[in-house]
Image: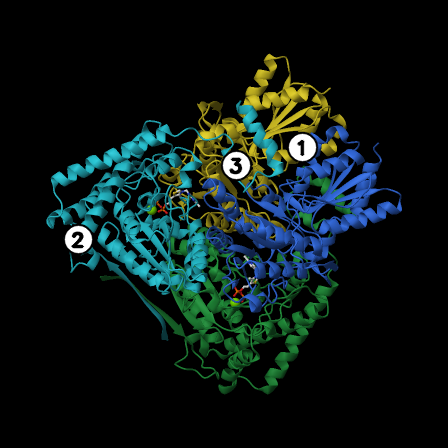
Chain colours: A yellow, B blue, C green, D cyan
Amino acid sequence: MAQITLVEAVNLALRHEMARDADVVVLGQDVGRDGGVFRATLGLLDAFGPGRVIDTPLAEALIAGMSIGMAAEGLKPVAEIQFSGFAYTVIDQILNHAGRLRHRTQGRMRCPMVLRTPCGAGIHAPEHHSESPEAMFAHIPGIRVVYPSSPRRAYGLLLAAIRDPDPVLFLEPTRLYRLFKEEVTDNGDALALDQCITLREGTDITLVSWGAMVYESLAAADALAAEGIAVEVIDVATLKPLDMDTILASVARSGRCVIVSEAARTAGFASEIAANLADDGLLTLRAPVLRVTGYDTVVPLARLENHYLPSAERIVSAAKHAMTFS
Amino acid sequence: MAQITLVEAVNLALRHEMARDADVVVLGQDVGRDGGVFRATLGLLDAFGPGRVIDTPLAEALIAGMSIGMAAEGLKPVAEIQFSGFAYTVIDQILNHAGRLRHRTQGRMRCPMVLRTPCGAGIHAPEHHSESPEAMFAHIPGIRVVYPSSPRRAYGLLLAAIRDPDPVLFLEPTRLYRLFKEEVTDNGDALALDQCITLREGTDITLVSWGAMVYESLAAADALAAEGIAVEVIDVATLKPLDMDTILASVARSGRCVIVSEAARTAGFASEIAANLADDGLLTLRAPVLRVTGYDTVVPLARLENHYLPSAERIVSAAKHAMTFS
Amino acid sequence: MSLAAHFDIQYTRILDDSGRALAPLPPFAKDAAALTELYRWMTLIRAFDAKAVALQRTGQLGTFASMLGQEAIQAGIGSAMTAEDVLLSSYREQGALLMRGVTMKDLFLYWGGDERGSHFSGARGDFPICVTIAAHATHAVGVAYAIKLRRQPRVAVCTLGDGATSKGDFYEGINAAGAWQLPLVFFVSNNQWAISTPRTTQTAAQTFAQKAIAGGIEGLQVDGNDVLAVRQAMDTALAKARGGGGPTLIEALTYRLSDHTTADDASRYRGADEVAAAWKLEPVARLRAFLTQGGAWDKAREDTLLHECNAQVQAAVEAYQNEPPPALTQMFDHLYAGVPAALQKQRAAVLAESA
Amino acid sequence: MSLAAHFDIQYTRILDDSGRALAPLPPFAKDAAALTELYRWMTLIRAFDAKAVALQRTGQLGTFASMLGQEAIQAGIGSAMTAEDVLLSSYREQGALLMRGVTMKDLFLYWGGDERGSHFSGARGDFPICVTIAAHATHAVGVAYAIKLRRQPRVAVCTLGDGATSKGDFYEGINAAGAWQLPLVFFVSNNQWAISTPRTTQTAAQTFAQKAIAGGIEGLQVDGNDVLAVRQAMDTALAKARGGGGPTLIEALTYRLSDHTTADDASRYRGADEVAAAWKLEPVARLRAFLTQGGAWDKAREDTLLHECNAQVQAAVEAYQNEPPPALTQMFDHLYAGVPAALQKQRAAVLAESA
Ligand SMILES: Cc1ncc(C[n+]2csc(CCOP(=O)(O)OP(=O)(O)O)c2C)c(N)n1
Ligand SMILES: Cc1ncc(C[n+]2csc(CCOP(=O)(O)OP(=O)(O)O)c2C)c(N)n1
Ligand SMILES: [Mg+2]
Ligand SMILES: [Mg+2]
């Protein structure tokens, strides 16, 4: 048992699963000697050798495509795309092939692969390093999309992702990589891959978020609690397949929902959750479903980044607006 | 004035604009002598020569990327991606470059390009030829997404798209390419690129759709009318930027909304519209916002395709369900 | 100025245009039984192909991609590979798939719009046909990497068209195969056309074989209508790969005698002369001439074979037509290992709406 | 077997490691004023580079990519191109951008996290730095196509790293440039590393120049630390392109003396010996030696130059620091030609929330 960061938890899960299962291989740019640009794969090369910890040429479509070939042959590739902005070139492979191999062959072939990529803004990174592509991937049939928001959840969800028999996109919030530590026991216990996680209970309003926005939502919940508003905070954790039951049940109690996402607003994943509420949850809603999101703009470079990103303040003010309905 | 099909209307608009503006060039696979696999570019090679009607090597990222270079140099490229299933490889170029060139350079450079691609299912085509990627593109900042549903709208919207100073993704419903004809006057009049089009008025329920689903929605509206239900049918036409005002105004009158989309349900564009209704339209809603969509599966091959696609019957039954609320 | 590197691309053929041996035959080509077996396959493939086109024309099959004129490639690849090797093919190498155990019924189902066609009765480790051009070049890298990691005596074979070589995936594949010295053979069927796009529009490269140089791997050219040359090149490349010698790129020069697919009309963009000239070089007649010259073949055997092939094809057509319709839930049941809770409702809806 | 094609890749250097001419000098290299001007630029670039790293280390700049050791490439490219040509560069050719009229202040703004840095004070037709590796190889094709279509005497120059050559976009770019014989020069700065990935991991190709063969275009190798060789290769390739002779791929052999960026620590993955050896070949000292040997340079001139360069850099730092902060609406105001109605509400929200 140790207090570790989220990126260390990713490393721990990789190490655990590579030791347990000889079919697990790690691949990507600079994942070997360098241990990955964020150090998520640190030490794996020395522990498992260059056959299983593979520095690839600089080619993302290759990384995704060769993972498919490896998975079809029975390996369990865990590929890293160095930054989320370079993940768009793999959509073709994930959508047209990884998510379809089992269906296309009617179960003859399978594609158990994990594609990890750091995501989200807030670390003052250069262009293309602050992307939130989750909605695009969540639209793809045949895959799972997972987005942890704490070291413990990163550990348990990554284990689950690697063990899952189908392709999983695993998004890691760079902003939380080293922001705080949590006690993580390296016991090999995976978390469920199809459940939202309720982090805080409250009956006045439901805050739904994932990735780094969970952190902002919790901060907003604290602030709101100080004003006597009881907030339920739900970490979606697995975006696809989505556990709407947990969200609907919460909103059935609170009657109000604010969904927080740092991605561009239009056709973002917040809209998916809101749409489900507008259908299956409509009769329980007491207030408009509000989305606090990034704007429909390019994530600005460092100097304006914080004006783009949803903040606890923006969440608080949305929640207070929702509270004006009853 | 002539009765022409949708694909002929596309051809007419291209021809009109190429004659009017020497900067317009057409490029893509087989767009020259062959006139495109759907014949959308038929005759352009003879009319405008191989310099402006360009058969490219088989490389979609190249087609998108070189369009960006051409646009930056002042040309107005209209590129064709042969089938929607091959459009995923261009997301990177459209998202990371086309949609960002103006912003990245703070207005120093611009990217007036159109990327046309046939979309949607229902023509018993092979694998990868039945895709509906509009939601992914609608999530991208800095671009427009247009999806006509009739010859006249195809003509007017394509002219507008070519004249627009920013990148436009222009999706063409293959199922409607030759399904019916309409009188189209080749007068060079463009349609507005930011307006939904109300095709039929009615106060009981609002049906919202785009592309080939407009056709199914109109059929459903006929069937519902026969049962005394007055249906308003809205063709979204331009998905991004979205004209929610027209939809909200309609739902404010009808209190009920069914959104029809053949794309996979989760994180599809139907969800975006529903989400906006759950926010800005909530207080006017009398019934849950229903989405009639494709399933969260791969579009099946020909034999099961019709079981996947939303049909007028499915729309009618959703509308009737919505009518049970009041 | 000094010479930094130097490359040669060689072209090989064994039979001339009229089926005469140009040089001493390689050992395998001296086995008449083996050659007539190759000929039998080429004939069967042509019969299958003609029937598939006919089924499409009469509304009994969807769009179909013909192999007409490329039968030597099928036979050369199909006969050279072992069962344990992995074929990753485009839609144009269905003949090779047939030789590996995929049935004609499977292929009819596939082109008939039924996913069960890719369930493959045989060749269970082979990839389904790759429709997105060149994407499978990267899958092949993964397969070959897995084979190498496990030190297995197997080889991945990836077949592509000339058009496919313009796509980034193709290049990322050959480059990676070179970097890791993988047991992988890239086979480019240069049939001169990519739909309506002639090979000169694809690239200024004089040969497709030279694309290998960019990946630092061996590239060579063969006459793709000479089954002996194709077979020899495959044998050599497979043996090299199996022995740890790394990847090879083979360019086979051939010609697409048919339309691109049944949805295409090639007369729109290429002249009849060109096609007529190409017919003179077609591979089936060439091998027949060679066999006949050597006394291993005659009219009677030909008639018997055609009769057998047609009967075999006809039986497959019947099996295809007698196949019960697919389950409505087929789109859900093999999407994930199990149907996720979130999809159960949708699955039920399909059943309800079709009831 | 017959020879289908044959290729040679040539390597050129003009100065040896210690700055001595190996052969008669090309005409441009006989102009001492021109060479000292090149030297002045290389020195300024190095001063700018050092300052940028220092600013980053003290929290006044974001992540920065240093050009240390690659100054000859900057000067060779920057001096050879005309104002009307178009440069499409990666983050590693900022020196060439400076020579083309982009200001140091622009670059500081860019790395300081402000989009206004890519508004470019000069070189208004050049592309902004391309961060997604090799994507701009396809943009360059479009630029060059437009130039060719309009019969203009201009050339597009696309600069890439060794790692970039592994990406499909690079290959799609060179292949298309060949197919259309475009006025386009691809310049690969082979600095031996792509972050922590050595060039041998990228490819089995012995040279990066030979990648050109896959696109059917000319490829050649030069000593990238020899500014005269770089300049000569650029002059030749540009003249050829301008004259309708089509594209060229130049590989320049160099070494990344710095970390990949300020966010990197290269000591994690490469030895000090290797770096020390590379320092012996660095380009600034080499040109200085050549100039000094020829009497065109001395200690006094060096001191003056360093002083001038530092002052120039310092002035730019001040201009950068005095730049008023960006408008909050910057993210909306240049996204589209006008702000669409659907975005007005969001734009107002940014202003309201920051009030
Ligand atoms: C990525 C992609 N783009 C476009 C297509 C449409 N398409 C199907 S076949 C084809 C031409 C392929 O030519 P080639 O590689 O020479 O193979 P051939 O058909 O001649 O065997 C094209 C453009 C596709 N299937 N995939
Ligand atoms: C498509 C893409 N993938 C990954 C990265 C992350 N990345 C930035 S620089 C770099 C290495 C580039 O190496 P090279 O092309 O040799 O250029 P150099 O940095 O050596 O100049 C990588 C992998 C990126 N920017 N773009
Ligand atoms: Mg071909
Ligand atoms: Mg490098």
Instruction: Give the residue pinned by disc 3.
Output: D333
Q: Is residue C55 left or right of residue C353?
A: left
Q: Is residue D273 left or right of residue B232?
A: left
- Sort mark 3 into few (<14), some (14-19) or many (20+) by Cα contacts within 10 Å: some
Tell me which amino acid carries mark 1: Ala
- Near-viewer residue (C227 or D66): D66
Subunit that carries the residue with mark 3: D
What is the C-alpha distance between the residues marked 1 and 2? 68 Å
Instruction: Give the residue pinned by disc 1.
Output: A274
- Quarter of the picture for ligand 1? bottom right
Measured as percent of width and height from the top left, residue C265 is found at 62, 71
Tell me which amino acid carries mark 3: Asp
Subunit that carries the residue with mark 1: A
Q: Is mark 2 within 8 Å of ligand 4?
A: no
Identify the image quadrant of residue D61.
Answer: top left
Q: Are marks 1 and 2 on the same chain?
A: no
Give the answer, above or below, for where B138 lies relative to D172.
above
Instruction: Give the residue pinned by disc 2.
Output: D16
Looking at the image, is mark 3 or mark 2 earlier in the sequence? 2
From this viewpoint, is residue D162 visible? Answer: yes
Q: Is residue B164 left or right of residue D175?
A: right
* Foreground label between 1 and 3: 3
Measured as percent of width and height from the top left, residue C350 is found at 75, 46
From this viewpoint, is residue B309 visible? Answer: no
